[in-house]
Structure formats: structure tokens, C-alpha cells
């Protein structure tokens, strides 16, 4: 029997994995993938709370997850375009090399 | 569940970028299965269309476009690894602990709620029509902006 707690725990672990990747890895694309994983963990929470919530007939959680997926798609498109633009200037997606603004 | 976690861990841990993208597809597919298991069919299929379809293809294209020999073997700066992992474990432990020990048991867990495409569509066209329009505008603006950012600048060689 999977309950709400199981889904919340899975979501927390997914968020932790995404956060670890975003903090540790130094490739811009991997960092973006980590951010996507964190967004997905939040979506899983929305849907789980909708499923086990007191008013599932009001589809609020589903709507929030749906709009969140749309925003995440826009974010991914802009983020990857930025990575490609940065790559064209620096010929690298390694984040440690993008230190032109460092004093 | 295990597939989702394994895919996510693989996407974050593997060295080869293409393997990372494939593991990411695995994680997204596992999430879509979880949505279906939760009874949210529409979200599950939207997840397959948007993430497994569009976002994964975008990421693979970005990997191919930014590919060169020196980024293949990624060197981690050793100082930030324990710090980053520690922060991530701390955050995940705090979130998971809060969820696990909060102790609220959902009462109506037995009844499987029905959210058909029909009710979602009716809500989208009545109660949520303004957010829907704003989201459409945002997506249009974001995609045009993405194209303009990624365009080759005039006068740039190659």
C-alpha cells in the first residue's frame, strides 16, 4: 500500500538528487537537468497531494502541475538557448571557465 | 519508483553527457508512470509528451551542438563535491523527515478520485482560462526569445 508519505519521500529523494547534481556538477547542461529534476519532484508533490487530499473533485493540484509543466518547458527552452549562446562565445559549457565577471 | 530514482541518479552521476540524457528520459518515464499510478492520466500523458518528447530532444540537441573533446571528460573541482553533496543530503533529509514524521494520515485515500480529461478541459476553459492565456503568451514569448538568443550573430564567422 503506497500512501502519501511514500510519494513525499520519493519526491524528497528526487529533489535531493537534482540538487546534488546542480551543486556538484560543473557542466551547464547537467546543472539544467538537475533543475528539471527538482521541478519534477515538486510536480510529483502536487499530484500526490491532489490524490490524497480532501477535495480531489476540485482539480486544483492537477492544474498547478499542468501549468508548472508548461513553465518548465519554457524554462528549458530559454536555458538551453542561453547555453548554446554561451558556448558560442567561450567554446565551452564548463561553468568554472565562465569567470569573466570575477574581480 | 526505483526506475525513477535510478534514472535520476544515473543522470546526475554519469560522466558521458549522452548517457546522462538517456538516464534522464528513464527518470521522466518513471515519473509519468507514477502519475498514471496516482490516477492523473492527463498529467501523465502530458509528462510523456512534454518531457520525454520535447525537453529530452532539446537537451540532446544542446549536447550535440555544444560537443567538443575537452568537455567529454569532466573534471570536478574537488572542494565543492563534499559540500554540495552534504547540502543536498541535508535538504533531502529535512524534506523527507518532515513528510515522514508529520503523521497526517489522509482519510479519503481509499476512494480513487476521477479526473477525466473532460473535467480538466472544462476547468481550463472556465475557471482557469486567464492563467491558460497567460501561459500561452509566456510560452510564445519564451520560444521567440530562445530563437533570438540562439541565433547566429550577424558578422560572426562560421
Image (spheres, rainbow, N blue to C red):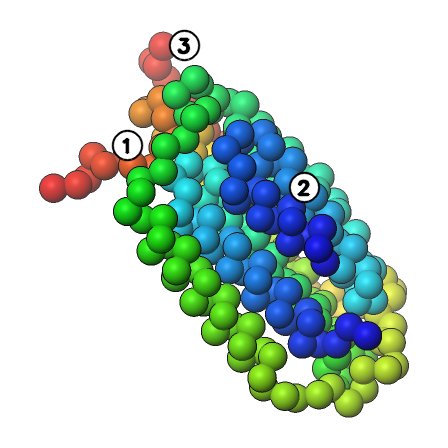
Tell me the quarter of the image containing the C terminus of chain B: top left
Depth check, mark 1 against mark 3: the one in front is 1
Q: Point out residue A47 in the picture as x, y percentages from the top left corner.
A: 70, 68
Mark 1 belongs to which subunit? A
B149 on left or right of B59: left
The answer to whether marks 1 and 3 sit on the same chain is: no
Q: Is residue A35 above or below residue A45?
A: above
Q: Work out whether residue B26 or residue A49 is closer to the camera in this orientation and state it.
A: B26
Q: Secondary structure at mark 3?
A: loop
How far apart are labels 2 and 3 at the CA level? 32 Å
Q: Secondary structure at mark 2?
A: helix
Mark 3 belongs to which subunit? B
Q: Quadrant of residue B85?
A: bottom left
Q: Which mark is residue B158?
A: 3
Mark 2 belongs to which subunit? B
How far apart are labels 1 and 3 at the CA level? 22 Å
Q: Work out whether residue B45 or residue B81 is closer to the camera in this orientation and state it.
A: B81
Q: Secondary structure at mark 1?
A: helix
Q: Quadrant of residue A63?
A: bottom right
Depth check, mark 2 against mark 3: the one in front is 2
Q: Is residue A54 above or below residue A34?
A: below
The answer to whether marks 1 and 2 sit on the same chain is: no
Q: Which residue is mark 2?
A: B25
Q: Which residue is mark 1?
A: A97
**Mark 2 crowdedness (10 Å alpha carbons): few <14, some 14-19, many ≥20:** many
Amino acid at each position: 500500500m503506497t500512501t502519501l508519505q511514500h510519494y513525499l519521500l520519493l519526491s524528497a529523494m528526487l529533489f535531493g538528487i537534482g540538487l546534488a547534481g546542480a551543486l556538484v556538477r560543473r557542466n551547464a547542461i547537467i546543472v539544467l537537468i538537475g533543475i528539471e529534476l527538482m521541478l519534477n519532484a515538486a510536480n510529483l508533490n502536487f499530484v500526490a497531494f491532489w490524490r490524497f487530499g480532501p477535495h480531489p473533485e476540485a482539480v486544483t493540484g492537477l492544474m498547478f502541475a499542468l501549468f508548472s509543466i508548461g513553465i518548465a518547458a519554457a524554462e528549458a527552452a530559454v536555458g538551453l538557448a542561453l547555453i548554446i549562446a554561451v558556448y558560442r562565445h567561450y567554446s565551452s559549457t564548463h561553468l568554472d571557465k565562465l569567470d569573466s565577471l570575477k574581480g | 519508483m526505483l526506475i525513477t530514482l535510478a534514472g535520476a541518479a544515473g543522470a546526475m552521476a554519469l560522466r558521458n553527457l549522452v548517457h546522462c540524457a538517456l538516464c534522464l528520459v528513464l527518470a521522466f518515464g518513471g515519473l509519468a508512470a507514477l502519475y498514471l499510478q496516482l490516477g492523473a492520466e492527463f498529467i501523465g500523458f502530458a509528462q510523456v509528451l512534454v518531457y520525454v518528447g520535447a525537453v529530452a530532444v532539446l537537451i540532446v540537441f544542446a549536447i550535440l551542438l555544444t560537443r567538443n573533446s575537452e568537455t567529454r571528460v569532466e573534471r570536478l573541482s574537488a572542494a565543492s563535491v563534499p559540500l554540495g553533496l552534504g547540502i543536498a543530503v541535508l535538504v533531502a533529509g529535512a524534506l523527507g523527515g518532515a513528510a515522514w514524521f508529520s503523521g497526517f494520515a489522509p482519510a479519503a485515500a481509499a476512494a480513487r478520485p476521477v479526473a477525466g480529461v473532460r473535467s480538466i478541459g472544462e476547468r481550463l476553459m472556465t475557471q482557469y482560462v486567464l492563467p491558460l492565456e497567460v501561459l500561452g503568451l509566456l510560452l510564445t514569448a519564451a520560444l521567440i526569445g530562445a530563437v533570438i538568443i540562439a541565433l547566429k550573430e550577424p558578422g560572426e564567422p562560421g
